[in-house]
Amino acid sequence: MALVELEQVSKIYRLGDQEFRALDGVDLRIEEGEFVSIIGPSGSGKSTLMHLLGCLDAPSSGRMEICGSDLSNATQNRLAEVRNREIGFVFQAFNLLPKLDVIGNIELPLVYAGIPAAERRRRAEQVAREVGLGDRTANRPVQLSGGQCQRVAIGRALVNNPRILFGDEPTGNLDSSTGEHILKMFRDLNAAGKTIVLVTHDPDIAAVSRRVIEIRDGKITREYAP
Amino acid sequence: MNILVPLQIGLREISSHKFRSFLSMLGIVLGVSSLIATLALTTGIERGTREFMQQMGGLEYVSVVNKEISNAKFEFWNLSPGRTLRDAQVIRESAPLVSHISPELSLAVGISSGTHSDRGTVRGVTPDHFVVSRHELAAGRFLTDIDVERGLRSAVIGSDVASLLWPELPVDAIPGQILQLNNRPFEVVGVFPKYQREEDKRRQGSGKPVSRMGRRWDPFRSKNESILIPYSTMFYDFRAGAFPLDSLESARLDTLTLRIANLDNFRAALDQVRRALELTHRGVDDFDLETREEWFDRMESSIRATRLSGGLIATISLVVGGIGIMNIMLASISERVREIGIRLAVGARGRDIFVQIIVESISIALIGGLLGVLAAFGLLEILKAIAPGENVPVMTPGGIVFSVGFAVFAGFISGIYPALRASRLNPIAALRYE
């Protein structure tokens, strides 16, 4: 079943009377269980594409279906709901809340899903163990290394058991061996059946996936399997 | 989303910027404390006034007073017999809306118990006096019709007189004692309790000194110093022969007071009294009816004015406090754009962010309000120390709840704009914000 289906999707930004087509008539289909990389230089539109796929934004035109629901003209609240239930995000800059400990950060999506506190805690603790942070649950992000922070972020992305996991340059702020480790986590997750979409500018990183989509000037220019 | 979550987030935010939060609360603290203090002051004045009124006979109390005759009727002045016992009898017969009427003669006399003596004012009254002046009894009985009919030498005394003359006797032992008034023996038949303000009772209980009213006339003290004997006894023992032509019924009264049966018929009752007195005074307008209405109205309007001006000051400081909170909340959200972006990215809706900011803003106001309650206690202690008046401020639970509620409302209002701004942030822009 297709988790992502884009048909002629465009995203247009207007600055005064200037028009900028960040995405221009993109068609894309991603099936459940795939491991896809989106690569392209900065300004190519790959971030815009990921924002659309991640339901952080709605397209200007075209049809967009994510996890079976048509979000072409979705409201902000509807997008928030899909983000909360179906999508997990891992960012380059980790984007953890500095005032919360590991558990507090991991359970954040559950807070907005309306899960009771005890259940949140139980699930967050379980996920913390799964990402290898079972012994650091009470630490704050500043007390963790970059790799550990990214594992907290992966835990946060996984806690709601989403159908798609997005990584936006997830290794960009990490040294190469830690980056390797994080990429291995993504591969393992995919092997366990999770659909994964990585956005990167680095072809070496894209090579860990099974399908690479190259984007340039808002258009998909090439697709290949590494 | 559970309301506890934004509350928890808000409290954490407040406690992680303690000084800043305190500064933003300051306006609310001042506003709430001055609002509570104003309410307490006016409640104190109101309560003091009401006690005072009650002691003086309440609104039902009407006093018949002498008045200068108008020029038109000046030459008939000697037609009027003035205020006499006859007035009281006629009013009793022809003014059914008047429930009690109390004619009074008074005289300064020497008083003595044999061991202690002093000077005092003795007053000849009828049994109605007990009701008109709102007396109670601590021991014994009040004067009866029999005392008046037979001209018995019975006396009822106030607590100050009792403790002056028989300082060692308990109040129960005072009825039956012999009291000398200008060397004539009277039997004390009853004693009044000690009349005092609620506040003075409390102070006495806690051993603090009882406030003195200074030179002002004090209904509490004058009741405590009263010596009451039957009207007829007063006339025959002390007044007869002073003016050879006087009889019991034509002696000029020193005081004539009455009590209206029902306040609903207040005007009609006054008209009845006026008509009766016009008859007995043969049309000469040498009397007037003094009521408490005007006095009470004046009191009420001055209380209202105090409340209004104090309330206005408090409201202004609450508004200023609200602006302070808004300012802090705006600063706080622009510093937390990224946090809000992260929350949005993991699935928070605009509504969730809105609630979070509003709850935070209300929490600041609520904490400020509660600090304001504490500050109000201090403020009132200072006020009491600076100006120990007779009307002690009274803090009521209602006033506290109202003031804190007002502060919470101010917090809510001032949170709306920052909360709207925060909830409308674009998640992508917020995530990129540095």
Image (cartoon, coloured by chain):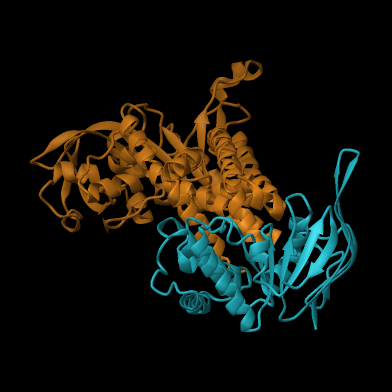
Chain colours: A cyan, B orange
At 51% across and 41% down in the image, what residue appears? B28
Answer with left or right where residue A43 lies relative to residue B88. right
| Quadrant position of residue B108 | top left
Answer with left or right where residue A157 lies relative to residue A118. right
At 20% across and 46% down in the image, what residue appears? B207
x, y percentage for residue A204?
A: 64, 63
Q: Is residue A116 visible?
A: yes
Answer with left or right where residue B81 lies relative to residue B275. left
At 81% across and 78% down in the image, what residue appears? A68
Relative to B89, residue A56 above or below:
below
x, y percentage for residue A174?
A: 52, 58
Toward the left, the furthest residue is B115
x, y percentage for residue B328?
A: 55, 41
| Quadrant position of residue B237 | top left
Point out the image quarter for the N terminus of chain B.
Answer: bottom right
Give the mark count.
Answer: 0
x, y percentage for residue B151?
A: 31, 48
Answer with left or right where residue B105 lies relative to residue B425. left
Q: Nearer the viewer, residue B313 or B162?
A: B313
Q: Is residue B263 visible?
A: no
Point out the image quarter for the C terminus of chain B.
Answer: top right
Q: Nearer the viewer, residue A111 or B160?
A: A111
Q: Nearer the viewer, residue B180 or A186?
A: A186
